[in-house]
Amino acid sequence: MQIVINGKNVEVTDQLRSYIEKKVTKLDRFLPNIGEARVDLASQSTKSAGDREVVQLTLHANGTVLRAEEHSSDMQAALDVVIDRMTRQIERYKGKHWRSLNRIQARDEVAPVELESEYDLVRVKRFRTHAMTVDEAIEQMELLGHDFFAFYEADNDRFSVIYKRRDGGYGLLQPELA
């Protein structure tokens, strides 16, 4: 497992780095074949001292992305809570969608953009995916904490987008060529 640690307004000391690596490597017991674990640390200026330190953990494993985030007054305490949340997410994921260890691992590639356009396109994200049902796409979207999720729909052999509606329901976009 590759562990990437980033700090924003935080000095990542050797002691903090070793603490993070020790905690994150334990997740390998629960979910084998974790390709990358990304830990983002941030210190924010907020009114509440209890929300200043932010830890976000993102795992890329078996074609799935899992994410957890915590705000706290202490960086190590926030990391402990994030590890606990991630452990529960892994258990929930394995209970619902565990199929095979031979899934293709998704790779996010950020390519430089050199397009002539009147709009300011700053990022292009390419990713590998596998066919899934609408229910699996909703679960993946919820695990990521996003409002929408683009996926290849297994039932119709086409790309679709699932999104969360303001009324709490879900919507499905199925584009057709004109």
Image (cartoon, rainbow, N blue to C red):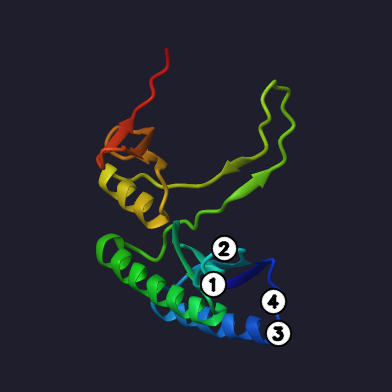
Q: Residue at x 49, y 81 (%)?
A: 77
* Amino acid found under the numbered disc labelled 1: Ala
Relative to 159, is 106 on the left or the right?
Answer: right
**Disc on the earlier residue, 1 or 3:** 3
Give me the disc on residue 12. 4
**Disc on the earlier residue, 4 or 2:** 4
Q: Percent x, y for residue 58? A: 51, 63
Indicate the secondary structure of the residue bearing disc 2. Answer: loop
The residue that disc 2 covers is 46
Whole-number angstrom distance, CA of label 2 to CA of label 3: 26 Å
Disc number lying in front (1 or 3) = 1
Do tag 2 and tag 1 residues touch (Cβ < 8 Å)? yes
Give the residue at the far front of this rendering: 47
Do tag 1 and tag 3 residues touch (Cβ < 8 Å)? no
The residue that disc 3 covers is 14
Q: Is residue 93 above or below residue 145?
A: below
* Amino acid found under the numbered disc labelled 2: Thr
Disc number lying in front (4 or 2) = 2
Do tag 2 and tag 3 residues touch (Cβ < 8 Å)? no
Whole-number angstrom distance, CA of label 3 to CA of label 4: 7 Å
Quadrant location of the N terminus in the rendered image: bottom right
Q: Residue at x 33, y 46 (%)?
A: 137
The residue that disc 1 covers is 49
Give me the disc on residue 28. none
Density class for disc 3 (Cα within 10 Å; few <14, some 14-19, many ≥20) is: few
Quadrant location of the C terminus in the rendered image: top left
Whole-number angstrom distance, CA of label 1 to CA of label 3: 25 Å
